[in-house]
Structure formats: C-alpha cells, structure tokens
Image: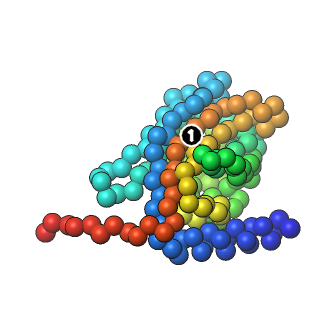
Amino acid sequence: MRRFFFIFIIILVSAVMLCYCDFRQERAKVRYCNPKYLTDCVVFTGRKSRHEPYLTNMTGTLVVPFGNNVTIALTLQMKSGGDFRVTTKVCEAFQSKWMKEFTIRHTNLTLGHCPYPPGRYRYMNMELPPKNVPIPVADGDYYIRFQMLVTDTNEEICDLITFLHFEQNKKPKKINKKT
C-alpha cells in the first residue's frame, strides 16, 4: 500500500511539473528555537530581482549532536484547511534520493556522517517546494511548516514557517531584457 502511495505521488508530481506553474514563497520566519539544542536560528525569504524566484535561506548552530535522536516534521498546511505531514528521523531522512540531492545542492551538511556534530549549518537558496520532492501540490495558498522534535519526548527544538502561493495554470511571464 505504501509503495502504491509513493508511485501515485510521483506520477502526480510529474504531471504538475509538466504544466505552467507559478510558485511564490514569502514571509519565512522562526516561530520557536529551543536554545538547549539550537541557537542563532535565522530564516529569510527574498529574491534578487523582480523576475527572479523567491528563495529561502536558513541558518542555525547545533549545540548537541543531531541524529536519530531528532525527528524532522514537514507539514504542508492549506490556508483553507487540511494538511499533509511527513515525519522522519534525521539520519533516515538522508536515505531518500530526493533528500540527498536537495542536501548536496542547498546545504553545508556532509552526507554519510550522521549524527551531525555541533556546529553552524545552513540551507541556502531553497526554492520551495523543492523541484524533486514527492509531495502533490494543488492550486492555492499554503504554509510550509518545518519542525524538529526530540524523538523520544516530542520536545520542540525548532519551528519554522513560510507562506507558499501556487498557481498551476499560470502562463510564464515574458521578460523584456534591454540590450
């Protein structure tokens, strides 16, 4: 059943990516950062120019090692109601192909070295949702919520949120470049 679900999601995402689509992410913010585990939490969404996509950057300093003692929860919340939530332990998260590709492209994490030692880590120039993530997205407004929790107790380590607007059938804008 689980395999069928993932195949269905991959087919659905592929169909969505073949159409004209417009994603706009904005208003990223740190809702909570637990200083026992993570300090200097910063998240920012912006774009270089009017015709560039919005990109999100996150940084933080791990105070303790993060491995399977930490669970990652990613929730796509529709503003109109309903949500889609995926949870996984940190070391297990990096076993999937799409997460490995995403990590190599957007972070300073070293794959294959889990648990991750204390230190400053960052995610840079992320376009949300990632192009290769197997999550179906329909037209509408969403909040993407990223949480890290202590696996055994569900104690919150951090809670980040960003807004995402998605239009599936929007025609791409023509950019008039001055020569």
**Residue that appears at 65% across and 39% down:** 147
Secondary structure beneath dot 1 equals: strand
- Quadrant assignment for the C terminus: bottom left
Position of residue 16 measured from the top left corner of the image (x, y, whole percent): 57, 70
The vertical placement of 140 against 117, above or below, is: below
User: Which residue of the protein is positioned furthest toward the left in this rendering?
Assistant: 179
Task: Find residue 24 and report its horizontal and vertical position in percent.
Answer: 45, 53
Give the residue drawn at x 29%, y 69%.
Answer: 174
Towards the viewer: 51 or 155: 51
Nearer-the-camera pick, 38 or 171: 171
Nearer to the camera, 71 or 52 = 52
Residue drawn at x 73%, y 42% is 71
The furthest residue to the top: 35
Residue matched to label 1: 161
Give the amino acid at mark 1. Answer: Ile
Q: Position of residue 127 (x, y in %)?
A: 48, 55
Colour scheme of the picture: rainbow
Q: Residues within 10 Å of mark 1 (few under 14, many from 20)?
A: many
Q: Is residue 69 left or right of residue 175?
A: right
- Residue 137: x and y in percent read 61, 61
Q: Does residue 45 appear anywhere in the picture? A: yes
Q: Farthest residue to the front: give it.
A: 80
Q: In which quadrant is the N terminus drawn?
A: bottom right
- Which image quadrant for residue 175? bottom left
Q: Residue at x 67, y 38 (%)?
A: 148
The answer to whether residue 43 is left or right of residue 12 is left
What is the count of numbered marks? 1
